[in-house]
């Protein structure tokens, strides 16, 4: 990782937005990621949850997300992200403990930002030096 490069973790909802690519903003963010404008961290736990969520009928069927597109998206994440190893455990988000995996990944990987629209995470604002921001704010941070 370059010392100057921004390092981020995206929560599942942000990753789903990128997988769907329905908005210009999500397509720009995906392009910025694949072009190396920032480093994205994921963990096995995050990828497992993402795969499960992308297969929900309300996403895969109703949003018209074919299996091949899901597999391609997850494959790119596996090859172009920095994987953490689920070594950290965090118990911070009392209202939704499933959000703790994103904080753990961010801490383990030394992330600058955790990108989420989830109020349980956003209300923290910051966690052990990791700034918790929305997608719009993160886009401004990386110059999109």
Image: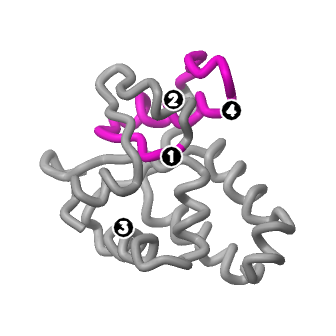
Q: Is residue 70 left or right of residue 141?
A: right
Residue 75 lies, in percent from the top left, at 59, 70
Mark toward the viewer: 1 or 2: 1
**Mark 2 residue crowding within 10 angstroms, few (<14) / some (14–19) / many (20+):** many
Residue under the point 39% across and 23% down: 127
Q: Which is more N-terminal, label 3 or label 4?
A: 3
**Going from the N terminus, do you reach mark 3 or mark 2 first?**
3
Q: Report, in whole angstroms, how far the alpha carbon at label 4 lies from the one at label 2.
A: 11 Å
Q: Give the number of the mark in front: 4 or 1.
A: 1
Look at the picture and state if 109 lies above or below 77.
above
Say whether disc 4 or disc 1 marks the residue closer to the N-terminus: 4
Q: Is residue 94 left or right of residue 139?
A: right
Q: What residue did someone put label 3 on?
A: 33
The answer to whether 142 appears left or right of 111 in the picture is left
The location of residue 116, given as percent across then percent down, is: 48, 45
**Mark 2 and mark 4 in contact (Cβ < 8 Å)?**
no
- From this view, report whether residue 60 is shown above or below residue 122: below
| Residue hosting label 2 | 104
Q: Is residue 90 magenta?
A: yes
State left or right for residue 40 relative to residue 43.
left
Q: Could you tell me how far apart the alpha carbons at marks 4 and 1 are, in whole angstroms?
A: 15 Å
What range is drawn magenta here? 88-117
The image's mark for residue 98 is: 4
Residue sticking out furthest to the left: 4
Residue 127 inside the magenta-drawn segment: no
> Which sits in the foreground, 115 or 104?
115
| Label 3 environment density (alpha carbons within 10 Å; few <14, some 14–19, many ≥20) | some
Of helix, strand and loop, which one carries label 2?
Answer: helix
> Residue 41: which numbered mark, if any?
none
Q: Which residue is mark 1?
A: 117
């Amino acid at each position: 990782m370059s010392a100057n490069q921004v390092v981020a973790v995206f929560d599942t909802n942000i990753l789903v937005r990128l997988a769907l690519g329905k908005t210009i903003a999500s397509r720009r963010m995906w392009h910025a990621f694949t072009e190396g404008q920032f480093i994205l961290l994921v963990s096995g736990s995050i990828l497992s949850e993402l795969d499960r969520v992308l297969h929900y009928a309300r996403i895969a069927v109703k949003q018209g997300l074919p299996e091949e597109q899901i597999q391609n998206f997850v494959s790119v994440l596996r090859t172009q992200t920095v994987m953490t190893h689920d070594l950290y455990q965090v118990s911070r988000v009392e209202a939704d403990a499933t959000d703790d995996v994103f904080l753990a990944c961010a801490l383990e990987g030394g992330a600058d930002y955790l990108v989420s629209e989830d109020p349980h995470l956003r209300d923290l604002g910051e966690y052990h030096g990791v700034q918790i921001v929305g997608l719009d704010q993160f886009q401004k941070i990386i110059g999109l």
